[in-house]
Amino acid sequence: MFIKWGIIGFGILYMSLALASLYSPGWMVAAAFQLNILAGILLSPFIYPDRKRQKIPAKPLMLSLVLVVGVFITQLEKLDTAGSMSEIALSLVIVLAGAIVWPLGNRKLLVALEAKNIQLNATQRVLGMSIGSMPLVLVLVLAAYKNAGLPSFSQCEASAYSALFSGFFGGVAFYKASQMVKHNTVALSTIEATQVFEIFFTLIGEMLLKGASLPGTYGQLGMMIVFVGMAIHMRNTLLHSRTIRRAARPTVNKQEPVGLLVEAV
C-alpha cells in the first residue's frame, strides 16, 4: 500500500517536477502545477467507493478553475522569457502528470487506510509514503550518479531546504488538514486549493532574498483573482460544513403539552 501510493504520490510527483524544470523556468512549473487543484476534484469518481464522495461538487470545481486562471494571469508578463513553444508544451505535459498523481496518491491512501481501519496521523502518513517511494528514488539516484556523478554542495543544500520546508513542514500540515476533512469532498477541495498560496510565498521570498520588484498589472490582477477566489472557496466550505452538521443533529420530537402530561403520569 505505502510502496504503491508512495511511488505514485511522492516519487513520480517530484520526478515529474524536476524533469519539467529542465524544459521551462521554475515559475512556469510552479504555476502549471496548480492544475492539481482541479485534478483532485475531477478524479473523485475514480477514487472513492461510495457514491456520495464520487459526486463532483460543481461550485468548488468552478472556484478552483477561477484560482487556476488567476495563477496563470499572474505569469503572463513572463511569457516572453519562457523559451520555445515545443519545450513549454513538453513541460506542461510532464507537470500535468505530476498534478494528477499528487492528489491521486493522497486521496487513494486515505481510502486504503479507511478500508483497512488503520488510524495514522499526518506524520506517519508522510513517513510511510516517503519510505514507500524509496524504490523509485534509489533507481533515480543510481541513474543520476552514473550519468552525472555526485551532486554539488549547493544542490544538496537546496534539496535539504526543500525537504525540510516543503516536504516536512508543508507536507505534514497539508496531510493533517486533508485527513481532518477526508469525508467532506467540498472541504478537501478547499484544502487542496490553498496550494495556490505558494505563488505568493515565492514572490515574498524573491523580494526579500533577491530584491525582486512587485509584479506588474497582470500579476496584481491575477493575485486579486486568487485572493477573492480563495475567500469564496473558504466561505463555501464553511456554509457546506454547517449544513452537514445540522443534518447530522438528531431530531427532537415535539409533543403537545397534553401528551407530555399523560407520559409523565
Image (cartoon, rainbow, N blue to C red):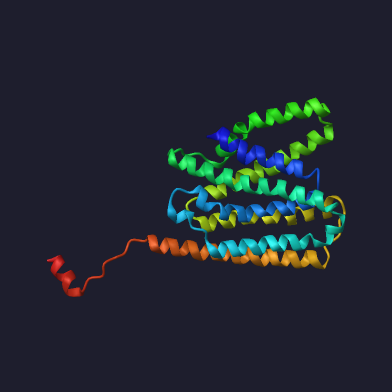
Relative vertical location of residue 45 with respect to residue 231 in this rendering, above or below: above
Relative vertical location of residue 185 with respect to residue 236 in this rendering, above or below: above
- Camera-side residue of 123 and 70: 70
What is the x, y in percent for residue 159?
A: 76, 37
Query: 15 left or right of 86?
Result: left
Query: 235 left or right of 153?
Result: left
What is the x, y in percent for residue 132?
A: 59, 32
- Residue 78 visible in this rendered orientation of the protein: yes
Query: 81 left or right of 140?
Result: right
- Camera-side residue of 193 and 90: 90
What is the x, y in percent for residue 233?
A: 59, 63
Q: Residue furthest front?
A: 86
What is the x, y in percent for residue 76?
A: 80, 62
In the picture, residue 2 is in which quadrant? top right
Quarter holding the C terminus is bottom left
- Residue 181 visible in this rendered orientation of the protein: no
Identify the residue shown where x is 15% and y is 66%: 263
Identify the residue shown where x is 43% and y is 54%: 51
Q: Count the marks: how many? A: 0
Query: 25 left or right of 188?
Result: right
